[in-house]
Amino acid sequence: MENSKIEIRSPHLEGAEVSWFAPICNGDDRYLGERSMDHKSTFENTSEILLTADKNGFRNILCPSSYQVGQDTLPFVAAVGPMTKQINLLAAVRCGEIHPPMLGRTLATIDHILKGRFVINIISSPLPGEEMSSEDRYQRSREVIEILKQGWTQDEIDHKGQFYNMKLSSDPVKPYQNGGPLLYFGGYSPAAVDLCAEHCDVYLMWPETEGNLRKLMKNMSAKAASYGRKVDFGLRVHVVVRETEEEAREYADSIVSKLGVEQGKEMRERALDAKSYGVSRQAEMREIAEDDGYVEPNMWTGIGRGRSGCGAALVGNPDQIVAKLNRYMDMGIRAFIFSGYPHKEECERFAKLVLPRLKTFSMPVAQGKVSEEEPMSPLGAGVRI
C-alpha cells in the first residue's frame, strides 16, 4: 500500500485553494488559556473575521461545528453568506444531528442563498450525550450522504439502511449546484477512509510530518481507486508567519506562554472528538517532537498543548512558509485551511506576506456544472467541471 501512487482528481490544476478559519466555536484568543471578551465568539466578531478573509482574497473559509461553545454553523453561514463577495463557505455538518431529508432541504436552501459558493465538511463525531462506536458513526454518515445525494440528484429518496429507512419525494431538496455541494471529509480510522474514498471529494488531513502525510495520501488514493474514484487532498493547519524566523518563533511561543498544564488538558478534552484516532495522532506527534516542539523544520506542535484536533502550526518567515506549501503542493495537496491567533490580525498578515506569492483557485468538482440560471466562470467559486 505504501508504494502505491498518489492520484488526485484535479492534476491539471496548478496551485491551491487557500482558505481561512472562522472561529465560531469560541477559539479566538491572543493567548491560549486566557479568555478575552474582545475575541468572544459572537456573530459580530466572527463575521468580521470571515469578511476580512473575503476582502483579502482567500477562496474558502471553514465554519466549524461544536456543541459546547460558540454558535450554530448553518444559521451563521446563511446569515453571513449574502454579506460576502467571492469567498466560498465551508460549513461543518455533524451527521445525525438533523433528519437527512430535512438536512438536504436546509443545505439546498443555503446553496441557493450563496449562488453555489457553498461546500460541506462532513463530520462524524458523536452527538452530545451519545455513545456510539466509530464504525456505527461512519455508517450513519455514509447513510446521511447517500440520502443527501439521492435528494439532490433524483426525483425520489429510496433508502434502506441500518439507521434510516425511507421512501419519499425529493422535490424540495434540489440545490443550486447540479449534483450538490462539494464534500470535504476528515478521518483516519479504516471506516473513515473507506467512507471518504466512496463518497467524498476532498480528504482533509491534520498536520503531520511530510512522510506521514504521504502515507495517508497513498492509502486514500488506493482506497478511492478501489471504488473507481479519485479524491483531492487538503491540509488543515495553523500558521505563524513573520518577517523573520526568529520573530515567528517568539510569537508562537507567546501564544502558549500563559497556558497551564491542567488547563491545556481540560481544553483538549472538552471536544466531542477528543478521544478519536485523529486526535491521538496529533498527541503522538507532540511526543516525538524536539524539546522546542518542532517535529520537522517549521512544523511546531506546541499549539496542540491547548487544542483538540488540529494541533500544529507552520512557523517561519514568508520564504520558509511558501517553500513548505510548495512542497505540500508538489505532494498533491490542493487545499489549505489556515488559522492563527488572533484570527483577524493573522488573516491580514498572512494575506500580506504569503498569499500574493501563491496561485489560488476554488476547488473544482468532478462533473456537472452550476445551475444554468446563473453560470459561473471556469475557475469561479462553486464551479463544477
Image (cartoon, rainbow, N blue to C red):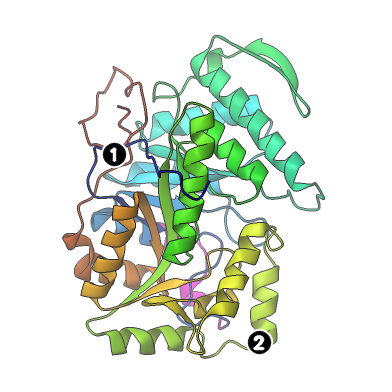
Q: Amino acid at mark 1?
A: Pro
Q: In the image, is 148 to the left or to the right of 370?
A: right
Name the image quarter holding residue 100.
top right
Residue 355 position, x and y percent, is 22, 61
Comparing 299 with 95, the one in front is: 299
Q: Which residue is drawn at the image coordinates 57% and 18% (left, top)?
A: 150
Element carrying mark 1 = loop
Q: Which residue is drawn at the image coordinates 41% and 47% (left, top)?
A: 233
Comparing 264 with 99, the one in front is: 264
Disc sitting over residue 22 in the figure: none
Element carrying mark 2 = helix
Can residue 22 be spotted in the picture? no
Mark 2 — residue?
261
Residue 30 position, x and y percent, is 45, 80
Q: Amino acid at mark 2?
A: Val
The residue carrying pointer 1 sits among few (fewer than 14), some (14 to 19) or many (20 or more) residues within 10 Å by Cα, namely: few
Residue 102 position, x and y percent, is 63, 27
Above or below, 316 relative to 344 = below
Mark 1 — residue?
11
Q: In the image, is 152 to the left or to the right of 361?
A: right
Name the image quarter holding residue 318.
bottom left
Q: Which residue is drawn at the image coordinates 49% and 16% (left, top)?
A: 153
Whether the residues at callouts 1 and 2 have beta carbons within 8 Å, the answer is: no
Boundaries of the magenta span? 34-47
Q: In the image, is 227 to the left or to the right of 166?
A: left
Can residue 213 be spotted in the picture? yes
For marks 1 and 2, the one nearer the N-term is: 1
Q: Quick check: is 87 in the magenta stretch?
A: no
Above or below, 104 relative to 50 = above
Separation (CA) of disc 1 from disc 2 = 44 Å
Above or below, 159 relative to 337 = above
